[in-house]
Amino acid sequence: MASLTTQLQVEIIKALAHPARLEIAQALSKGERCVSDLVELVGSDMSTVSKHLRLMREAGWIDCEKKGQQVFYHLGCDCLPTFLDCIAAIGQGGTCSDC
Amino acid sequence: MASLTTQLQVEIIKALAHPARLEIAQALSKGERCVSDLVELVGSDMSTVSKHLRLMREAGWIDCEKKGQQVFYHLGCDCLPTFLDCIAAIGQGGTCSDC
DNA sequence: CCATTACTTGGCATTTTCGCCAAGTAATGG
DNA sequence: CCATTACTTGGCGAAAATGCCAAGTAATGG
């Protein structure tokens, strides 16, 4: 039953459905960050964070740009902050006003 | 690092991050359905669908009501259709206009 | 060049999720 | 009552996701 389209949409949603990835999304909503910053934020090994970032990039949520030896990640989809606010509102039991 | 709040939000997102659950969400956006309808829709065992429904209910996305021997499920959050449209738009490579 | 920093990728063990079957519960009809 | 329908729950093997370590790559500084 699940169409290719459905599967693609699931991959997009799954890319946010993990504590580290959600925290990364929240951080990037406030501005770009390099990988080391995000490693410090989520507290996992850099290799782990790197893989999370790849997933999110493949899903289209984020993009990156290399500057010298650092790689800076930033949002790739304008929807994301609204999306996160919506989920946060639902999480607090309230109704979401934005969406 | 991941706070309790973050973990809760992740559970809410995860409740949509599965082909069967996404299809159920899309179906319920068009109106209420009983479990048997949804079993036919997703093509899995009824016990499997029942467990998906429980997850979605615990996340707050849906509610249910028993009518006779049937259980009808319906949306529990007004955000959901907008949310789904947004994901669908992202999935098609376009920018999301609604959110 | 060579060492160092900043990352990415491969591999693999551990944990989590998934989905079926079997069994249990609740409402309806005869 | 008893059988049937419509579900839910428990259990468990199979599949997928997660995260660390080790190894590989690219840019910079000396």
Image (cartoon, coloured by chain):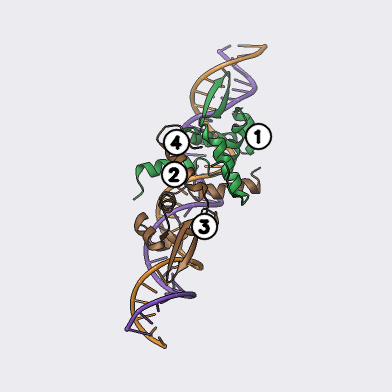
Chain colours: A brown, B green, C orange, D purple
The foreground one among B56 and A12 is A12
Q: Quadrant of residue C3?
A: bottom left
Q: Who comes first in sequence, dot 1 or dot 2?
A: 2
Of discs 3 and 1, which sits in the foreground? Answer: 3
Q: Which chain is disc 1 placed on?
A: B
Image vertical order of residue A76 relative to residue B18, above or below: below
Q: Are marks 4 and 3 in contact (CB under 8 Å)?
A: no
Q: CA distance from mark 3 to mark 1?
A: 35 Å
Q: In the picture provided, is A99 more to the left or to the right than D28?
A: right
Q: Which chain is disc 2 placed on?
A: B
Q: Which mark is residue B40?
A: 1
- Decide: few, some or many residues near mark 2? Use Cα within 10 Å; few <14, some 14-19, many ≥20: many
Q: Who comes first in sequence, dot 4 or dot 3?
A: 3
Residue occupying image coordinates x 57% and y 43%: B86
Specify whether disc 3 shares its chain with disc 1.
no
Image vertical order of residue C10 relative to residue A90, above or below: below
Image vertical order of residue B66 relative to residue B57, above or below: above
The residue labelled by disc 3 is A57
Of discs 1 and 2, which sits in the foreground? Answer: 2
Q: CA distance from mark 1 to mark 2?
A: 28 Å
Q: Amino acid at mark 1?
A: Glu
The residue labelled by disc 2 is B10
Q: Are marks 4 and 1 in contact (CB under 8 Å)?
A: no
